[in-house]
C-alpha cells in the first residue's frame, strides 16, 4: 500500500470536520466526521493523464466510511464514484463507478489474508462482465474468479484507448 501511495500526487482543496468523544483513559476514542474535496487533482503514475476536477463528500466514523458522491474528469470525460466501507476489522466494500459509457459495481469483503469478491459486474460500451471469486494468501496470492463476459469485439479498441488516456 505504501508503495502505491508514493505513486500518487494530490493537489486541490479539502475541508474536514472531526468530532471525538470519550475518556482519554479509555481508548480508543469514538470519532466521526466528514470531508469535502473541492477542485482537486490526482496524478497517478499508472495513468497516462491526471484525474481532474475532483469534487465530493465523504463521511466517516471509527468503523465506516461513506462516499455519497465523488465526481471527477479523466481525459475530458465525467466519472462518478459512490462507495461504502463498513466494519474496518473485517471490511465490507460496496462501490459503483460510472460514466457515460461505463457502469462498474463491486461488492467485496475481506478478513486477514482473504478477499471475497461477492460481485464484480460491469458494462462498458456494449460489453458486459459478471464475476465472483476470491484471493487468498497475500504472500503467495491465489486468485480464483469465475463468471461470464459478453465482449463486443468492436469495444476492445475503445476500451484500450480509454485505458491509455485517449478518447477514441
Image (cartoon, rainbow, N blue to C red):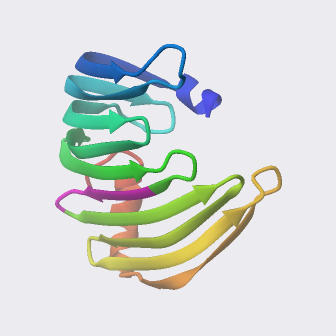
Residue 112 coordinates in the image, percent (x, y): 69, 52
Above or below, 75 relative to 55: below
67 lies left or right of 38: right
Q: Position of residue 119 (x, y in %)?
A: 45, 73
Magenta region includes residue 38: no
- The residue drawn where x is 41% and y is 22% is 22
Residue 82: give x, y in percent of width and height: 26, 51
In which quadrant of the rendered view does residue 168 lie? bottom left
Q: Which is more toward the observer, 9 or 119?
A: 119
Q: Is residue 106 toward the left or the right of residue 36 in the image?
A: right
In the image shown, does 36 or 41 lie closer to the viewer?
36
Q: Residue furthest right?
A: 140
Residue 163 relative to residue 78: left or right? right
Choose between 75 and 121: the one closer to the eye.
121
Residue at (51, 38) in percent of width and height = 46
Query: Is 133 rendered above or below residue 98?
Result: below
Residue at 49% in and 72% down: 118
Instruction: Reply above or below: 14 against 117.
Output: above
The majority secondary structure of the magenta stretch comes to: strand
Highlighted magenta segment, given as a residue range: 93-100
The number of discs equals: 0
Quadrant for the N terminus in the image: top right
Instruction: Please provide percent x and percent y for residue 142.
Output: 76, 65
Q: Is residue 94 magenta?
A: yes
The residue lying at 22 percent from left, 49 percent from top is 79
Quadrant hosting residue 43: top left
Amino acid at each position: 500500500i505504501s508503495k502505491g501511495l508514493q505513486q500518487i500526487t494530490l493537489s486541490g482543496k479539502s475541508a474536514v470536520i472531526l468530532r471525538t468523544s470519550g475518556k482519554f483513559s479509555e481508548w480508543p476514542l469514538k470519532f466521526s466526521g466528514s470531508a469535502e474535496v473541492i477542485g482537486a487533482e490526482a496524478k497517478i503514475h499508472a495513468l497516462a493523464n491526471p484525474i481532474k476536477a475532483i469534487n465530493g463528500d465523504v463521511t466517516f466514523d471509527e468503523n465506516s466510511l461513506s462516499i455519497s458522491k465523488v465526481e471527477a474528469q479523466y481525459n475530458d470525460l465525467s466519472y462518478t464514484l459512490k462507495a461504502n466501507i463498513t466494519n474496518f476489522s473485517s471490511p465490507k466494500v460496496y462501490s459503483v463507478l460510472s460514466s457515460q459509457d461505463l457502469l462498474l459495481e463491486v461488492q467485496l469483503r475481506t478478513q486477514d489474508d482473504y478477499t471475497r469478491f461477492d460481485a464484480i459486474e460491469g458494462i462498458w460500451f456494449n460489453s458486459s462482465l459478471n464475476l465472483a471469486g476470491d484471493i487468498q494468501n497475500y504472500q503467495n496470492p491465489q486468485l480464483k474468479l469465475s463468471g461470464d463476459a459478453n465482449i463486443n469485439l468492436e469495444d476492445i479498441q475503445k476500451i484500450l484507448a480509454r485505458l491509455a488516456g485517449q478518447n477514441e
